[in-house]
Image (spheres, rainbow, N blue to C red):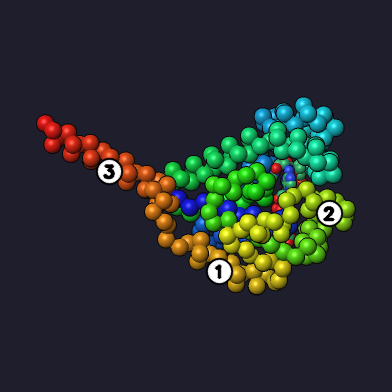
Amino acid sequence: MRLVGLTGGIASGKSTVSSMFKHNHISVVDADIIARDALKKNSGGYKKVVAAFGPDILQDDGQVDRLKLGRIVFSDASKRQLLNRLLAPYISSGIFLEIFKLWIKGHKVIVLDIPLLFEAKMDKWTKPIVVVWVDPETQLRRLMERDNSTGEDARNRINAQMSLELKKSQADIVIDNTGSRQDLQERFSEVLSQVKRPLTWTEFWLSRDGALSALLGVIIGVLAGKKLFW
Ligand SMILES: CC(C)(COP(=O)(O)OP(=O)(O)OC[C@H]1O[C@@H](n2cnc3c(N)ncnc32)[C@H](O)[C@@H]1O)[C@@H](O)C(=O)NCCC(=O)NCCS
Ligand SMILES: Nc1ncnc2c1ncn2[C@@H]1O[C@H](COP(=O)(O)OP(=O)(O)OP(=O)(O)O)[C@@H](O)[C@H]1O
């Protein structure tokens, strides 16, 4: 099994690239969706976060007001670390559960779309690591346009993450998404062929079919051994 790490900065284009993988029938585990589930009303993560941040972060319907919580944590590093600490066990177990479900189904290449791949030290599980990079001006503009946010809110969110330059320097594959969507599509086609190249032996043994082959090999070996010695 090949676990491909997909990361980048906020609004650098990870979800756009992740949709391209899905269109090409490659499974994607989306950490943002798992993190959203971890904050759903009455979930374990929700209870811990409400206990720590107080009922002021709730909407009238009892759900977490994500905009409000976002404003709090993206302007205060210690509160952000607290939120990360509270949600991390739910997010990592959610990611591993999704990987396991896909492994059972026999998927051989799985893309993990994890914004905080490096920050959460999950990069050691993935190879190759694909970083979607944009230049800082484009990143700020796209973020403000997409979220309809002020420059201050957008800068706070960008600064809450490890620098995109540092992420770029640790990537196996860099997708420069500063250009047009057409440019991105062309670069993506090159990356897709790298991601889909045949599995290495290690990746094969880690896949469901590889593990089953190994198990079958062991069973045949044991049976053959018994026959020899009887
Ligand atoms: C603070 C929250 C409620 C804000 O919700 P909101 O709907 O406004 O943003 P959303 O969840 O869609 O995240 C948008 C982007 O923000 C960035 N981001 C999210 N959480 C963090 C964080 N803790 N630190 C740095 N960047 C983050 C990511 O690039 C993400 O793609 C939410 O982001 C959250 O619960 N974050 C903590 C969980 C987490 O770490 N998520 C990232 C998954 S690896
Ligand atoms: N090449 C491009 N040209 C123009 N707009 C783009 C391009 N790529 C992405 N966008 C737009 O930029 C915004 C950010 O992209 P996207 O949502 O994919 O980023 P992201 O990295 O997934 O963000 P987040 O970290 O918040 O999840 C979106 O509005 C998207 O439509």
Nearer to us in this view, 105 or 132: 132
Q: Is residue 40 visible?
A: no
Please name the amino acid that badge 3 sits on. Answer: Gly
Contact? badges 3 and 2 (CB < 8 Å): no
Q: Is residue 228 above or below residue 193?
A: above
User: Could you give the CA–CA distance between mark 1 and mark 3, rounded to whole angstroms?
Assistant: 38 Å
Q: Which image quadrant is residue 48 in?
A: top right
Classify mark 2: residues with Cα within 10 Å, few (<14), some (14-19) or many (20+): some
User: Could you give the CA–CA distance between mark 1 and mark 2, rounded to whole angstroms?
Assistant: 31 Å
| Residue furthest top as drawn | 51
Q: Earlier in the sequence, mark 3 or mark 2?
A: 2
- Classify mark 1: helix, strand or loop: helix
* In-image side of 225 versus 186 (left or right): left
Quadrant in the picture for the C terminus: top left
Please name the amino acid that badge 2 sits on. Answer: Arg
User: Residue 62's spot in the image, x, y percent?
Assistant: 78, 32
- Classify mark 2: helix, strand or loop: helix
- What residue is pinned by disc 3? 217
- What residue is pinned by disc 1? 189
- What residue is pinned by disc 2? 155
